[in-house]
Image (tube, rainbow, N blue to C red):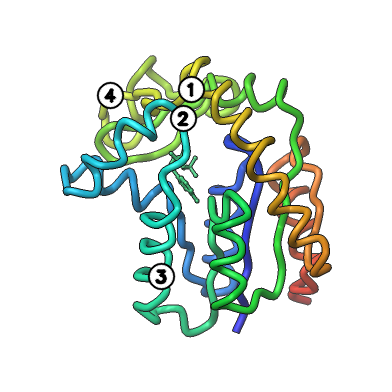
Amino acid sequence: MRKYVIMGVQGSGKGTQATRLAAEYELEHISVGDIFRWNVQHHTKMGAQVKRVMDAGKLVEDDMVDAVVRDRLEQHDWNYGFIIDGFPRNASQAEFFLERYDIDGVINLDMPDSEVERRVLARRLCSQCGLDYNLMAHRPEIEDTCDVCGGKLVARADDNPEALAQRLAEYHEKTSPVLALFERKEFILNVDATRSKEAIYEDIVAQLGLRKD
Ligand code: AMP
C-alpha cells in the first residue's frame, strides 16, 4: 500500500506527474480540483456552491473540502494506494488528513512564480474531451481546436492573470505552512519542477525508492 500527497503551485505539473505515477503503480489518482470541476460541469448543488470561489482563485472552505476527501477515500477503491493532488492546501486540512491517514511520502514540486505565470496563462483544455494543451509545448494542429475530437479549446475559468495572482498569494500564505508541518514529520521530497516532465518523473521515482529494474 502506497499513500502519497503531491503538492506544488498550479501549473507545476502536479496533475501530469500524479497521473503517470498512478498509472504506473496502480494508485488511485485523487484530485480535489477535478472533483469540484466535475460538480461545476454537472451543475450539482456542490458545483453551484463552489463555482464562484473557484473562478476567483480562492480556496473552497475546509469543511466541504474535508468532506469531499473523506467521502472519496471511503470508497476504498485504492487497493494499492493513492496519490492525492491539490490537498491539503492549508494547515487545518493537513491536520485533518494526518489525524486519519498515515502517509508514505509528500512530493513537493518546486517552481518559481514567474515560471508558473508563463505556463498557466498558456494552458488550454478541450471543452469536449478534456485533453490538455499548452500553447508553448503542446500546440494543437489547428488553432483553438482539439486534435483528437475537434472540440473547441478553452482556458480554465480560473486561468486568467487576476485569479492566478490570487492563487499564488493564497498558496504562499496558506500552503507553505503545510510544507513546514510535513517537513517536521520528515516525509517531504523536494523536486525541481522547472525541468522536463521525464526528468521530474525520474527524480520522483528515485526519491520514493520505486524504480523498477
Ligand atoms: P486545482 O485544480 O487543484 O488547481 O483546484 C482548482 C480550485 O479548486 C482551487 O483554486 C480551489 O478553488 C479549489 N480547490 C481544490 N483543492 C482545494 C483544497 N484542498 N482546498 C480548497 N480549495 C480547493
Label 1 vs label 4, nearer the camera: 1
Disc 2: CA contacts within 10 A as few (<14), some (14-19) or many (>=20): many
Name the residue carrying label 3: 70
Q: Relative to 94, does residue 168 appear above or below in the rendering?
A: above
Q: Is residue 113 left or right of residue 192?
A: left
Q: Residue type at mark 4?
A: Lys
Is there CB contact under 8 Å for labels 1 and 3?
Answer: no
Tag 1's secondary structure? helix
Name the residue carrying label 4: 152
Name the residue carrying label 2: 57
Between the residue at mark 1 and the residue at mark 4, the CA separation in whole angstroms equals: 22 Å
Residue 14 x %, y %? 60, 47
Q: Quadrant of the C terminus?
A: bottom right
* Residue at image coords 37%, 78%: 74
Residue 9 x %, y %? 63, 38
Is there CB contact under 8 Å for labels 1 and 4?
Answer: no
Is there CB contact under 8 Å for labels 2 and 4?
Answer: no
* Residue at image coords 54%, 67%: 96
Tag 3's secondary structure? helix
Is there CB contact under 8 Å for labels 2 and 3?
Answer: no
Q: Residue type at mark 2?
A: Gly
In the image, 67 versus 74, the foreground residue is 67
Q: Is mark 1 within 8 Å of ligand 1?
A: yes
Asked which quadrant contains residue 127, the reply is top left
Between the residue at mark 2 and the residue at mark 1, the CA separation in whole angstroms equals: 5 Å
* Residue at image coords 54%, 65%: 22
Is there CB contact under 8 Å for labels 2 and 1?
Answer: yes
Name the residue carrying label 1: 163
